[in-house]
Amino acid sequence: MTKQELVAKMAADANISKKEAEAALNSFVASVKESLGKGESVSLVGFGTFGVSHRNARKGRNPQTGAEINIPARRVPTFKAGKGLKDAV
């Protein structure tokens, strides 16, 4: 499902315009990004939890040359599906 298909489905289900549905979806995505950027998690009961995980620095290899490279430490977004989502799938 693409973003536009999701917006159309949200608009139909909530009986609102596509423009309002897109604004709501954009607000949700921005809020999740902002919270994750602060290192906070976002929990939606029955759906899942968006969180932030830390990956340590490590050494890797360039697949073309085989040269060893350093991969820096970084924070990455994670998602853990809730029971309701797991049961639906």
Image (cartoon, helix red, strand yellow):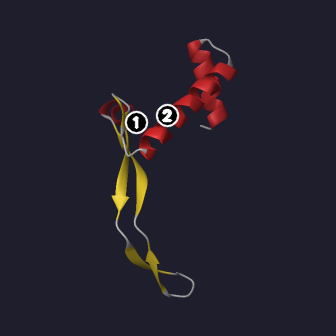
Residue located 62% across and 36% down the image: 3
- Depth check, front residue: 18 or 89: 18
Which quadrant: the N terminus? top right
Q: Which mark is residue 31?
A: 2
Q: Position of residue 58 (x, y in %)?
A: 37, 74
Dot 1 and dot 2 residues touching (CB under 8 Å): no
Q: Residue 89 carries which label?
A: 1
For mark 1, give the secondary structure: loop
Residue located 47% across and 37% down the image: 32
- Depth check, front residue: 65 or 83: 65
Q: Where is residue 36 in the image (x, y as percent from the top left)?
A: 43, 44
Left/right of residue 17 with respect to residue 38 in the rendered view: right
Viewer-side label of 1, 2 = 2
Residue 56, placed above or below residue 7: below
Which residue type does callout 2 highlight? Ser
Which quadrant: the C terminus? top left
Mark 2 packing: few (<14 Cα in 10 Å), some, or many (20+)?
few
Which residue type does callout 1 highlight? Val
For mark 2, give the secondary structure: helix
Residue located 43% across and 39% down the image: 35
Left/right of residue 60 with respect to residue 4 in the rendered view: left
Left/right of residue 27 with respect to residue 86 in the rendered view: right
